[in-house]
Amino acid sequence: MPPIQENRFSNPGSEPFAWKAGTRSVVSLLLFMHLCTIAVALTSTSPSPLQIRLLDVFRPYLAPLHLMVDYTSRFHFTHGPEEDLDHFLTVEWSEGAEGGQSFRLPTRKIPGSPRFHRLQLLANTAADFARSETWEVEIPRALASYYLNRWNQEEATVRVMAHVPLSTAEVARDTDPDGEDYLRPVYEAKATVFQGEVQLLKRSEALEVAPAQEDGP
């Protein structure tokens, strides 16, 4: 049996490396703070008032690391309530020099990009606002104002649409996820420029103002 050779790089007389007590305390504190911020971020998909305040405090640390969790995170395969649906915004008109235009936000051309996520958040927020009579017009009116002014139009139709996800069986049948059966209007209004300001007339309100008249004998 060949003799065991001693490792020439080892130093039998040296003691194992150990951090000083103060250094260990600082590292332990930083590690504890890091784990706390991660825990707050991951549990804040539907944040409480306290979590919102904590996220504001930790934002300078979490944001550069891309650890800010969107509060509208969706879990299509586990929950599926109305708030979990993806939404998009459309503005369209059928008359004018351009012969009609239609815009959709977010578009399908930029999935996964930061701009796509910002526009997706905007559309989902518009859907949340649609449940409130006080806030439902804010985002559609701002969007209509931008496009009407950009294209020098007087009227347009603005919609907030919900995109209903497919079931497992529908996916297996190669169903078109953008088919009409899977798009549901959440809010729809006619935007009109009146005295320099954009006014919105909600579709249900328009039907109440101008009901269909039956033909008389």
Image: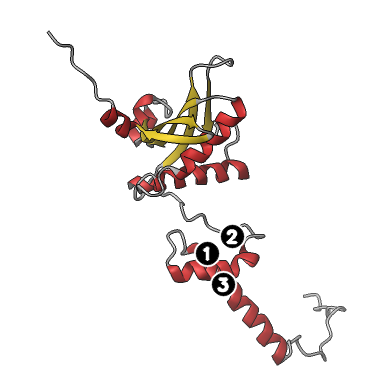
User: In this view of the protein, can residue 113 be seen by the observer?
Assistant: no
Please state the horizontal and vertical placement of residue 96, each as a whole percent of the image.
54, 16
Q: Which residue is mark 1?
A: 41
The kind of secondary structure element at disc 1 is: helix
> Tags 3 and 1 in contact by the CB under 8 Å rule?
no
Of badges 2 and 3, the one in the foreground is 2
Q: Which residue is mark 2?
A: 67
User: In this view of the protein, can residue 70 be seen by the observer?
Assistant: yes
Rendered-image quadrant of the C terminus? top left
Please state the horizontal and vertical placement of residue 104, each as a whole percent of the image.
52, 31
Sequence-first disc among 3 and 1 = 3
Q: Which residue is mark 3?
A: 35
Sequence-first disc among 2 and 1 = 1
**Label 2 neighbour load within 10 Å: few <14, some 14-19, many 20+:** some
The kind of secondary structure element at disc 2 is: loop
> Tags 2 and 1 in contact by the CB under 8 Å rule?
yes
> Residue 6 versus residue 62: which sits nearer the camera?
62
70 to the left or right of 2 = left
Rendered-image quadrant of the N terminus? bottom right
Q: Residue at x 81, y 90 (%)?
A: 14
Q: Residue furthest top?
A: 217
Q: Amino acid at mark 1?
A: Ala
178 to the left or right of 203 = right
Q: Residue furthest left?
A: 217
Query: What's the distance in space between the residues labelled 3 and 1, CA to CA?
Result: 10 Å
Q: Amino acid at mark 3?
A: Leu
Q: Residue at x 24, y 21 (%)?
A: 212
Query: What's the distance in space between the residues labelled 2 and 3, CA to CA?
Result: 12 Å
Q: Where 188 sits versus 94, above or below?
A: below
Q: Quadrant of residue 9?
A: bottom right
